[in-house]
Image (spheres, rainbow, N blue to C red):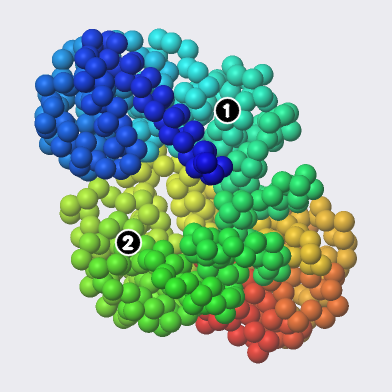
Amino acid sequence: MFSTKSFSKIQQLLIIYRQTNRLCFMYSSSSSSSSSSIKLGSTMKKLIDSKEYKKVLNLYDKHCEMCTDFVIDMTIKACIQLNDYERIKNIEKNLSSKSFNSSFIQTSLIQFHFQNGDIDKVLNISSRIANKSNYLYTIVFKGLNTHNRADIVLDLYDKMTINPDDYTIATIFSSCAQLANQRAMNIGRRLVDKISQNIQNKTSLLNSSIHMLMKFGDITKAEEFLQMSKKKNIITYGAMINGYNINNQPLKSFNLFQQMKHENIKPNETIFILLIGTCSQTGLLSRCQYIVNQIPLHFYKNIQLNNSLIDMWGKAGSIKNAQQIFESINNPNIITYNAMINAFGLNRMGFEAIKLYKKISNNLHNERSHICVLNACSHSALHREAYSIFNQISNKTERIITTMIDCLSRLFLFDEAQKLINEYEKTNPPSLLMYMAMLSGARNRRHSIISENIYNKMKSLFPGEKDALISASILLANTYTSLGDSQRAGDIRLDRIKEFGKEVRVGLSWTEVNGTIVQFKAHDQSHPQSKEIYTELKQISAELIEYGHEYDSTWMTRPLQKNETVESVLCGHSERLAIAFNFVARSNPSMIQITNNLRVCGDCHEATKLIAKIRKCEIIVRDASCIHHFYTNGQCSCQDHF
């Protein structure tokens, strides 16, 4: 008598057997194979299912005279698993035209060449196939996306002579999302318009289109698809949360999480990793703790989730929590180490970052390890330590050199930074990131000559980098403003508007009070308590002036408008509004936490040090560069190095 478990196993084996025979028939019917060839193919299929790939090759060597298309395909699949490239090349070389036209063999060969990184060979095979199917297009498109060649996908799509099916369209959407340039946006939106009526009932199309639209920054359209869909799943919600994260909309991510809870949709590990990423964006301790409290204990077995938690706690300014997660991991991988080193760096704990970096075996260090520790040295003004580490790195990549240039530029060592650039450009094309790092340091030094020279060189070297040139123009204009040369600053702004339009990144600050996250932009008056907030700002300003604070107009980034003063402009910065709101909403808070998407200005930095001292309230501000801990003694953890 068979047990239920045994009977179920027998059923599975019968299904596999029938599927194998069906596959063998498909191959043999086209090549008039004998029964022995069918039996050989069936045996090979079973061996592959059992992962006994060497036995497959042994059979091929013994019975190669019975090479049906099915046998050839099974042999190629075994070779792929064993990385036996020479054998595959030999098989491919001797293929008959009939065997080459087998869609199964074509697919296996394409898989092999993708695995080998030979894109040209894949394209060669694809071009020789007369009647291409959507299945073949999808395989090729997915492989190209994996190898970051989405541009070729769009070229092939333009030449397609058949209508793409849902799976092919979903892959094209992934290509468009990967590129997110004007051509990709045109193709992606055109396809979306064609199939918009079908998306609401097709989950795979819905998810891929949402991801693409979010990469385009088209949040409204993605939200429309979410609302009209009748078949949302956990992947759909993941695509939306990831999209909100990409577009710097953390509040919407948190709201969507609440919607999932309301609809009794249980978040999986991927959703929690995305939400941890949302928490990393806001850097607000209370919200981080709220999300952590929702995570089931068994999810902590996921190393990626733990790595994300270390990153999150580091960006929230809680090194203690980050270290607890780090120490709870039995076998931390290099990603874990890098996350912890980066957490130390963000919180100005350069020596701790170096100590942990040196604990890692040299052969495990990767590019990210070097960048994290050099950033930690940069944020802690550890110039000599940074050079010592930098000189020991054998493979100095563009990003590693850029990080070292950033470190030197922060310390105003521009000659040394320029030497690194000159040395790099002897064997490499110029790097946009390196020039931006130098320009940022020159702005902090208020060095107009260096700033102007770097900006002009960037315009010459990188004429097509619109976003970077806008940022560079803003830095240059701010440099002249800080020197009191409003005429030159105004000319630079006008030139920027003429050339690029009015695309300037809006400064945003987030803070959380009583479980609610509030967002402010500069001079924001949209909050229901705006009247009380501005009244509190005036009170804080009076206290600052009484303590000797002088508003520094050099940190203004635009000319004064009618009815404005230097005081009113600087007090209207988004982080000042967030600080004032905390005092309005809570009586005598002992700690305030704020996240700013831009770097804190010098006047806000000086003012916040004084506010923390006057109000006896610790204030933590995470800006785009690092985390500032403003203590009640009037000092900042960055020691005024920012």
- Amino acid type of the residue that numbered disc 2 sits on in the rendered structure: Glu
Residue 439 is labelled as none
What secondary structure is marked by label 1?
helix
Q: Please report the residue visible at 60 percent of the width from the left and 19 percent of the height from the top.
A: 195
Name the one closer to the observer, 293 or 285: 293
Q: Residues within 10 Å of mark 2 (few under 14, many from 20)?
A: some
> Residue drawn at (65%, 38%), measured in percent from left and top?
233
Residue lying furthest front in this view? 1
Pick whichever, 145 or 527, lies toward us. 145
> Residue drawn at (39%, 28%), measured in percent from left and top?
17
Q: Is residue 73 left or right of residue 551?
A: left
Image quadrant in which you'd find residue 596: bottom right
Q: CA distance from mark 1 to mark 2?
A: 36 Å
Q: Position of residue 15 (x, y in %)?
A: 45, 29
* Three-letter amino acid code at the position of disc 1: Leu
Identify residue for label 1: 205
Name which quarter of the figure residue 450 lies in.
bottom left
Mark 1 or 2, closer to the camera? 1
- Residue 395 in view here: yes
Mark closest to the chain's N terminus, 1 or 2: 1
Question: In the rendered image of this protein, does residue 427 appear above or below residue 194?
Answer: below
**Label 1: few (<14), some or many (≥20) within 10 Å?**
many
Q: Do tag 1 and tag 2 residues touch (Cβ < 8 Å)? A: no
Judge whether 604 appears above or below 401 on screen. below
Residue 367: which disc?
A: 2
User: For the point 37% across and 62% down, which residue is it?
Assistant: 368
Q: Position of residue 503 (x, y in %)?
A: 57, 43
**x and y percentages locating residue 374 in the rendered image:** 37, 71
